[in-house]
Image (spheres, rainbow, N blue to C red):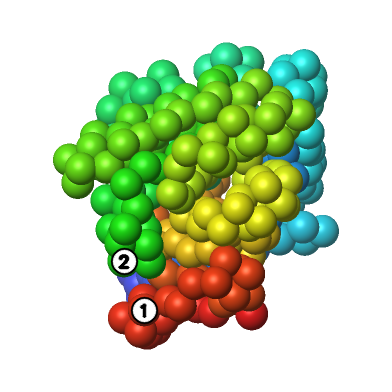
Amino acid sequence: MNLSHISKKMKLLSLGVATVFAAGVFAGCGGSQQAGSSSGKTYKIGVVQLVEHNALDAANKGFVDGLKERGYEQGKNVEFDQQNAQADQSNLQNIAQRFVSGKMDLICAIATPAAQTVANATKDIPIVGTAITDYVGAKLAASNEKPGGNITGTSDMNPIKEQIDLLLKIKPEAKTIGTIYCSSEVNSEVQIKAMQEYAESKGLTVKVATISTVNDLQQAAQSLVGSVDAFYEPTDNIVASAMPTLVAITDPAKIPVICAEPNMVKAGGLATYGIDYYKLGVQTGHMAADILEGKSKPADMSIEMAKDLKVTVNKADAARLGLTLPEDVLKDADIVE
């Protein structure tokens, strides 16, 4: 047996192994930011949005853009199935079944009723939610820290105390607050309960009217408008989708509407200290990317809170109401003209 010949073979073999190992190492480096772009798989992602209004539209766009930032892009390695339920429960159920039978790799549910419906339809497909106020209260998660099932996501819980404080800065003489919300929206009930507790601690009286559909909004507003000094509106999907109907009643009566989020201000409300729903959607997209990459499972992913809050004021509405907004409110605020 020729030992020198064997030695040469061993050296060549070692060199080959080292080369393959090095290639593997370098292939692994730099792939973490956009893992989706190099996996070779096309992912099927279903997106169900409860109803069309600015906040949910912004969250939807943010979700898609957040995934794109991580390398998951329509026409490249993702097929999005975008569905809008138009606030109809039977539509939600049909969409959920469509996603399950279509064997989606992941579902994004935008707003609480949408998330509840898809969560009831599947316990296997991972779900990320957004524009959902209270996952535990809606029975979507065992806890915010450890959801425990197949759903996680981002919460749009509002800084309610700061929003009522904003109302009192703008209208310090206010004694009675009116609020309208849809009785079937758990997220709205949670917000109104918290708002009532804080408002009453500040010596305010709260009058509540509930609605079932957008068709009830006008009558509900008219029932309150003569007995309240201001309105506070939570992130209620029915009210948010029909802000022009509400302010058509409140503006002539010179009653300001403080809203829970900026898009409701852009639709006619007076002011908010609230969430940027586009950024909330981006945050949700990043969570979805972690799931697709196998980094995390919904059961172990904490519900994330909104990271960016801002004051938004509608100067045109202030003019219609005959209100002069305080300088400390206008400072650093986003202005709607």
The residue that appears at 63% across and 15% down in the rendered structure is 121
The location of residue 45, given as percent across then percent down, is 69, 41
Q: Can residue 24 be seen from the camera position used here?
A: no
The one nearer the camera, 150 or 326, is 326
Q: What residue type is labelled 2?
A: Lys
The residue that disc 1 covers is 326
**Quadrant placement of the N terminus:** bottom left
Q: How crowded is mark 1: few (under 14 residues within 10 Å), some or many (20 or more)?
A: few
Q: How crowded is mark 2: few (under 14 residues within 10 Å), some or many (20 or more)?
A: some
- Which dot marks residue 115? none
Q: Answer above or below: position of 185 versus 22.
A: above
Instruction: Provide the secondary structure element on which disc 2 rests.
Output: helix
Q: Can residue 226 be seen from the camera position used here?
A: yes
Q: Quick check: marks 1 and 2 in contact, CB under 8 Å? A: yes
Q: What residue type is labelled 1?
A: Pro
The location of residue 238, given as percent across then percent down, is 65, 36
